[in-house]
Image (cartoon, grey):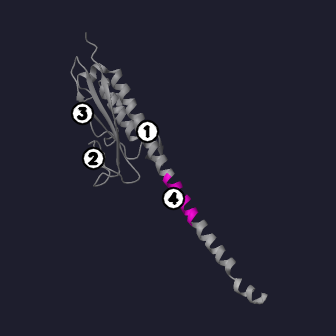
Amino acid sequence: MIPRAAMRHKEQGITMIEVLITIVVVAIGLMGMAVMQMTSMNNQLEAYQRSQALFLIEDMANRIRGNAAAARTGDYANATDFGLQDIEDCDLEVTQAARDLCEWNIAVIGTSTTLDGNNIGSVVGANACLENIAGSADGETIIRLTVAWQGMTPTVSPASDCGRNNYGADDRFRRTVSVDTVLASLAI
């Protein structure tokens, strides 16, 4: 039979090992929660950027629908590099289409909201493009509106050319969203 004093001596330190293992397990769990929180915040920003890009597209689509005659004649066709152009005084524009494009450029740049002199009223590194897909003066006209922006993490490069090579050499940080605006032929 083993004396009690000897048994007690063998068990000393077991509690300390259990505490250390518990601390390691809790630390790993907390690090996992921190990574999940950072991923969640990143995904939230990406979703916000996408919704802002869609808002910009819807704004221009409404402008085009409101000035369908000019859109059919090509006044909105194949305009690129919005968000990269200098800010102009849109009141000086002669046609409604030119004014719409000027105001959209300002919206894409994000000058409506500034912080410490930086434009923060739009998506990060926004760039927008208009492309005339199909159209005629009296028939159906389709204009593709695309907004590109800089994402937070690398992913697959989008197929759209809008903003290509503006967000890194391999475009893996570039995000795009496109919407086709259709002006139906109302001729009988």
Task: Determine the residue positioned at 69% across, 77% down.
Answer: 15
Task: Determine the residue positioned at 24% across, 30% down.
Answer: 132
Label of residue 66 in the image: none
Mark 3: amino acid = Asn
The percent coordinates of residue 120 (x first, y second) are: 45, 44
Label of residue 164 in the image: 2
Q: Residues within 10 Å of mark 2 (few under 14, many from 20)?
A: some
Which one is in front in this view, the residue at disc 4 or the one at disc 1? Answer: 4
Task: Kindly give the residue lying farthest to the top in the view shown.
Answer: 188
| Left or right: 42, with 24 as reference point | left
Task: Kindly give the residue lying farthest to the front in the view shown.
Answer: 1
Figure check: 60 above or below 9: above
- Whether residue 109 is visible here, answered yes or no, is yes
Which residue does the numbered mark 4 point to in the structure image? 35
Q: Residues within 10 Å of mark 3 (few under 14, many from 20)?
A: some
Q: Nearer the viewer, residue 79 or 171?
A: 171
**What are the residue bounds of the magenta stretch?**
28-39
* Earlier residue among tags 2 and 4: 4
Which residue does the numbered mark 3 point to in the structure image? 78
| Left or right: 76, with 9 as reference point | left
* Earlier residue among tags 4 and 3: 4
Marks 4 and 1 close (CB-CB < 8 Å) = no
